[in-house]
Image (spheres, rainbow, N blue to C red):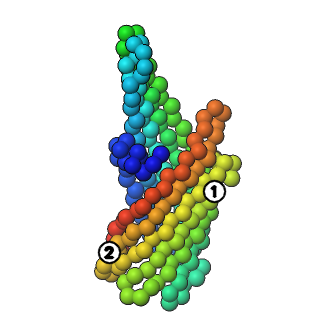
Amino acid sequence: MSFGDVLKELNGAMMASLEMRVGHWGFLVDGQFSQVTSAGTLPGPFFSSVKLRSQTTTIQGSVLHRVHEGPTVSLDVGGGVRFWNLNNRLEILPGLANLRIDHRDSEMWADPIVGARLGIKLSGPWSLTVAGDVGGFDIGSRLTWQALGSVNYAWSESLTLKAGYRALHVDYRNGSFSYDVTQHGPAVAITYRF
């Protein structure tokens, strides 16, 4: 689907993350939620319309270790688990046939992941962040990966503004259920450091 189509049918989306650092170790929790609803009319007199709602929730927990920290470059490597919950609902509303169809389907699974994050300090308050991970390995999904790049501006010691691009892919199959999706697009974020 194009960005315009997704935006038109998007009911809501939310992303949030929390990171705690202790020495060279970092503990990261990252979550995403989105809901998309698509609807249309059906041909013929027996049913009037159809509506499909799809909810996607991911929660990721990771442990990172800082393997390099220089004056301009830092590198973290680590691993974790990404949990998935899909919830789909199909509604077919009655027409002449006094019959309503309401079908729900859901899937939950967990993917082990390994990844890295690179931080590059530029001049003044500017910096870059590049991060990525890969996982699944046929334990949960066949394959999942994530990539993120952002330009950061340190507004103050506590507040950082970020703008970048994020992509998240998963290829999961369980019997007749198949979910092969890549979500990607621009991302704008505010980071507050306590």
Residue at the front extreme of this rendering: 43
Q: Which of 104 and 139 is in front in this view?
A: 104
Total numbered labels placed on residues in the image: 2
Question: What is the quadrant of residue 156 in the picture?
Answer: bottom left
Q: Can residue 113 be seen in this view?
A: no
Q: Nearer the viewer, residue 106 or 27?
A: 106
Residue at the image point whose x is 39% and y is 32% from the top: 39
Where is 179 relative to 75, above or below?
above
The dot on residue 135 is: 1
Which quarter of the rendering shows the C terminus? bottom left
Residue 176 placement (x, y as % from top left): 64, 32
Where is 40 relative to 190, above or below?
above
Dot 2: within a 10 Å radius of its alpha carbon, few (fewer than 14), some, or many (20 or more) residues? few
Please, what secondary structure does the residue beneath circle 1 have?
strand
Q: Is residue 15 visible?
A: yes
Amino acid at the residue labelled 1: Gly
Amino acid at the residue labelled 2: Leu
Please, what secondary structure does the residue beneath circle 2 have?
strand
Residue at the image point whose x is 47% and y is 34% from the top: 88
Where is 95 relative to 76, above or below?
above
Residue 103 placement (x, y as % from top left): 47, 25
The dot on residue 180 is: none
Residue at the top extreme of this rendering: 97
Give the mark, 2 or 1, whose residue is nearer the N terminus: 1
Residue pointed to by mark 2? 159
Residue 42 placement (x, y as % from top left): 42, 22
